[in-house]
Image (cartoon, helix red, strand yellow):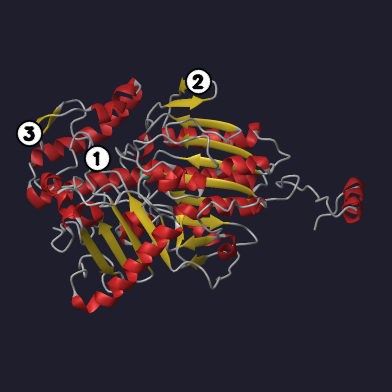
Amino acid sequence: MKHRPLLALLLLHASVVSSLLVLPSEGHAADGRPNILFIFTDDHAPHAIGAYGGLLKDVNPTPNIDRLAREGMLFRNSFCSNSICGPSRAVILTGKHSHLNGFMHNGNRFNAGQQTFARLLQQVGYQTAVVGKWHLKSNPVGFDYWRVLPGQGDYYNPVFLGPDGREQIEGYCTDLVTDMAITWLKESRNQDKPFILMCQHKAPHRTWMPAARHLSLYDDIDLPAPATLFDRFKDNASPARFQEMEIDRHMNLVFDLKVSPDKLFDPTAGKSVDRSGFRNLDKMTPAQRRTWNAAYEPKNKAFRQAKLSGEKLVQWKYQRYMKDYLRCIKGVDESVGRLVDYLSDSGLAENTIVIYSSDQGFYLGDHGWYDKRWMYEESLRMPFIVRWPGVAKAGTVNEHMIQNLDYAETFLEVAGADIPADMQGTSLVPLLQGKSPDDWRKSIYYHYYEYPSVHMVARHCGVRTERYKLIHFYQFGEWELYDLENDPDELTNLYSNPAYRDTIAELRTELKRLQVVYQDDSDMSEMPAEWKQKYRKQ
Ligand code: CA
């Protein structure tokens, strides 16, 4: 330990005299409580993170996020409660399921008057800040500093909203949000208070537009494709066959895959398409646009000449989709590196909890899909990695079932704040301390509501235990049961198998129990027969 001059000795003496005084040291807030840096992305599936393993790990997509896992704790069984952007964020803010916080689907507007962890942290002396993707329609409340994207926001030259209005900034969104986070840490925060900073990226959300420096990354390799890329949903309940999120039939060559950025004609559709979703090209500077076209046009030309069809076309679309997705993630991973380096350089690392998470998982060609929404594993899972020096043992993997429902209570316990009785999660602090509480949850509850809507994923609720998953597509009166141990890809629906009658009865009882515990009395009635017919007629 370094010896400090007389003043420090006097302070040390004072601290002995008054047990209330905690010695300020470099990087520590005056009161010693930990800071929280919450790095949060949009649609980053765990199986696109090296530390979680899986098909893409050999591509080394996330060295900086992997470093957090090596230096902290990785949660293997981290799940969302409603796999879609706005609802997941509302659950995180409130610690309550969608039906109680009121943000059940992306068409809702967050009731900013309600209790959130941000308001509660302010009350116990934390400084609160959020930058980047917000996606809750109403403006942030409970934050001392906020600068967020309106709606989905743009990848290039995005507009930001703040208390003083709107401002468009030239640059790439992931980099700009990182700059804002670091600038706030460096220049704007009150150094006498602990903070929570939420650095929330738009990436890697659709339409997967990478930074200029990453446009040609992975051009020289073929990515491995999932075994279920050509799943025909033979065993599923009917909703899986009537969705609109297949790489084959629904992923658009212009809107999603940038094949003809200067044209309105989509060869897949055989007609002109609305390119409004790809409008961000029109906001690029001439230099950005030249760089973009120089990277994509030669690849697009080769694609047009190849005149692919059938499974070869699907394979090509998968490669273009997944490379753009991973290129966006490369930008995110570099952001994580910059933030973590800043914490080290500024002396903040030791007393700052760093969390990496994303609002839900995503289909990376699994079951032939992109997007999220379903209770199936790929979109149910969320990354959750925590580096907490001196508390979470470096390099540990935690197998307990956790949910986004738990984040609010975790933040409050870290801050020493009271946890309101109406929050529905459980603080993760004991798990981070390496404990295994006997009464930890043995099942999780899920409920998705956005239907009929984009991608046409039917409403469903369900329960997942360590081994089984029971899903109820109540509008259609259909069920699915999967044995996750023997069938991790969820290809064999066991609901009609008589050997599982007892398991099904137990899981149905558990589902009902969870609906009572979480007070979910949403309308779960079946649709009239003619409506079912209409939605199945594809
Ligand atoms: Ca999302």
Marks 3 and 1, the one that precedes in the sequence? 3
* Disc 2 and disc 1 in contact, CB within 8 angstroms: no
Q: How crowded is mark 1: few (under 14 residues within 10 Å), some or many (20 or more)?
A: few
Residue 534 pos. (x, y %) = 11, 44
**Which of the image's four quarters has the C terminus?**
top left
Query: Which label lies toward us, 3 or 2?
Result: 2
User: Residue 434 occupies which quadrant of the picture?
Assistant: bottom right
Query: Which label lies toward us, 3 or 1?
Result: 1
As displayed, is residue 17 above or below residue 289? below
Query: Which label lies toward us, 2 or 1?
Result: 1
Left or right placement of residue 454 versus residue 379 in this view? left
Residue type of the residue flagged with mark 2? Gly
Residue type of the residue flagged with mark 3? Gly
Residue type of the residue flagged with mark 1? Ser
Marks 2 and 1, the one that precedes in the sequence? 2
Q: Residue 453 carries which label?
A: 1
Q: Which mark is residue 165?
A: 2
